[in-house]
Amino acid sequence: MAVTSAAHVTAAPPERESLHDWLDRQAGRLFILPAVILILGFSIFPLIASAYLALSRFKLAPGGYTLTFIGWFNFKKMLTGSQQFHLLGTFGAITLVGWVTILGTVALVVWGMLRYVRSGRATVVGWIGRLIMIATALALAVLFAVNLGEGGQLGTIATTMFYVVGGVAVQFAIGLGLALLCAKPIRGRSFFRVLFFVPLMVTPVGIAYTFRMLADTAVGPFAPLWHWLGFAQTSWSADAWTARFVVLIGDSWQWIPFIFIVLLAAIESQPRDEVEAAQLDGASGWQIFRDITWPSIAPVAATVVLIRAIEAFKIIDLPNVLTNGGPGIATESLTLHAFSEWRALNLGGSAAVAYILLFLSTITCVSFFNFLVKPMREGRA
Amino acid sequence: MSAMRRLIEPKSLDAMSPLGALLVYGALIVWSLVVLFPLYWIAITSLKLPIHVSAGPVYLPFVDFLPDLHAWRYIFVDLGNDTLRPYLNSIVVALVSTALAMLIGSMAAYALSRLEFAPRLGSILLFILLGALMIVAVAGFGVPWWVAAAVALALFLLLMRAAGRTMRASLGNGDILFWIISQRILPPVVAALPIYVMFQTLGMLDTRTALIATYTTVNLPIVVWLMYDFFVTIPKDLEESASLDGASRFAIFFGIVLPLARPGLVATGLLVLILAWNEYLLALFLSSANAQTMPVLVAAQNATRGPQWWYMSVLILLMILPVIFLTLLLQRFIAKGMLLGAVKG
């Protein structure tokens, strides 16, 4: 049947066929063109424009504004100049924990490089990518060490990394736990599944205000509890770390459902017969998880962590509403930093912060994708 | 002894021991409370008078305090159109941008999963270079933007013809896919200002169109990413036989491939819809009065007198309800859809 219709097509009138052919030949381009044009217009153009803005000074002038090209000044001011405390934080003397962090990172990097050289698949591009990643990882480790050292304070870079790493870790752990529970053969699974999905649907601004209500130690729902514990007079928003953890809790409440729902779907598609066979052989729950469940959901887990990390870098609503970035700049994320510079009409500085955020999140996410997600999806690691 | 064993050991392979079941239910119920309590607090706050909020916590309507509909009356009657307009804006913007992102994104994802593309590296570099020059000319030397755009486009086409052939290096499908996905990494705050200026130049600030166009693009990478994984898992035999029958690519795509990918479309669509419905930062930049969306209205209740918790709660509830309804409706697709999207690659 297929053959006869193919013959029918060749026998069609030439004009119609050429149009048909032309459309078919161009179909691929026509399919992909709208997406490319949109992205060029709304992502690439703003990206280049922002780059220009980051290198210039914006000033309101009578009847409009002026843009003066000032080179790397915006970046210099934040990396080494008067705004260094804001972006990089205050540097303190490195403590023992700091040295352990740095040495641990170095050891990890050396181990990774040795493995890469031994694999025999080393290429020039691979080396360039790895060197950029190593430099970033070491810089972050040193930054954390000096920020957490005596007399040090976290800047917006370290705070953002705390939200990303801490948030994703907490959300992944709880999300995985809930998914494992919901995958058990119990009654009412679908009810829990829908219920646990709900926080994802609430607008982040709404969540931020809701948690501001809930976390109020004077008139919030837990006020009697705080009172009883003797915390009624102390405010969580006055201490840097408790404030950061409250932001983290709000963020987790919203995003655990996302990790939960994806991992649940992955767990339910694991090979059932293998699980049953293992159960017959008397394997414990932990053994089944380690040897059957985890290997089968690892690629999905890596992907979902990546998606979550990409979004986590953009956190702004929660710190903005909950603490307004405070106390001081303790809970300020990079996006909030850029936003507050923008509100202060320092557009050049705002663009520069945004670019630093872009740089950081790109390197982190691309490294994560290349060294964890891709090998897992290809079934190598 | 045997009673003890019955408590711990499961009766059959699939069932759990009573003790295990108790622990599982305990954990699930604890988490249900964690999920429900903030929602409950929003719901009762929407029924509270200001005094009930400011004088310390009250928990149970009719027991601790007498519920009052003043906040609901304010939002629906006093504000009236000022609530309705953002609500309509949010609905229109979220639905239209989701539909567009799904259509454009699935088309691109399908093309990437079925056809080979090889854009020349040279032409891409040329494009970026001309784009940068154009922006420098407009921002630095005050050239009108449409002149710069026309010159850049003409130069691009000319140079492509002249020099395009000499550079052989080209990229593949994987690179295009990665490029599109990487756009999601772009923090909105990087793009917000230039997009603001762009719409200002076009005179389209504070319109739904501006928001729709922006949201469509912002969510496009997610659609391409998830739908690409779907299309890869759909066997090609059907399409091949349809193609032999003389069906065009378009007919195949809309007639065969899209219906087959329905679970993925629903799951991805719902995710994108939720993201567009809840988006705040870009809406704050791009809308003021006419095109204001609900998240901006929620934040606007933080007035000079401090946050108006009761009004805010009503608005948050109004925002959650339709999404919950939609999720219940599409529930069975979600788990299936999310899975396929994330597993296969």
Image (cartoon, rainbow, N blue to C red):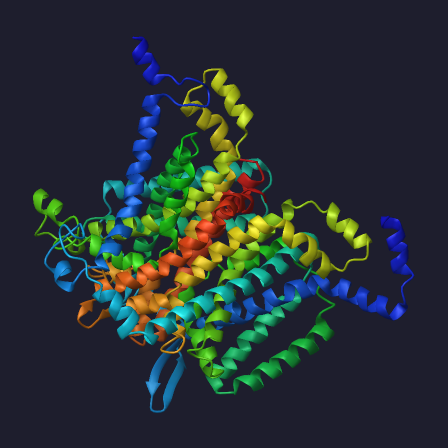
Task: Determine whether, in the image, residue B57 is placed left or right of residue A26.
Answer: left
* Residue at far top of view: B1
Q: Nearer the viewer, residue B50 or B145?
A: B50
Q: At x 55% / y 66%, what residue is drawn?
A: A39
- Is residue B41 rendered to the left or right of residue A60? left
Residue at the location (31% across, 40% down)? B31
Is A111 rendered above or below residue B201?
above
Residue B277 percent coordinates (x, y) = 42, 62
Residue at the far bottom in the pictured view: A63
> Residue B306's x, y, as percent?
18, 68
Residue B166, picture quadrant: bottom right
- Judge whether B337 appears above or below B311 on screen: above
Image label count: 0
Is A169 situated above or below A41? above
- In the foreground, A25 or A116: A25
Can residue B97 be seen here? The reply is yes
Name the side, left or right, on which B216 lies relative to B119: left
Establish if A100 lies above or below A76: above
- Where in the figure is residue B159, as x and y percent of width and height? 69, 76
In percent of width and height, residue A359 lies at 43, 59
- Residue A146 is at least partly visible in this image: no
Which residue is located at x 54 percent, y 24 percent? A274
* Picture quadrant of residue B191: bottom left
Of residues A228 and B77, which is closer to you in this image? Answer: B77
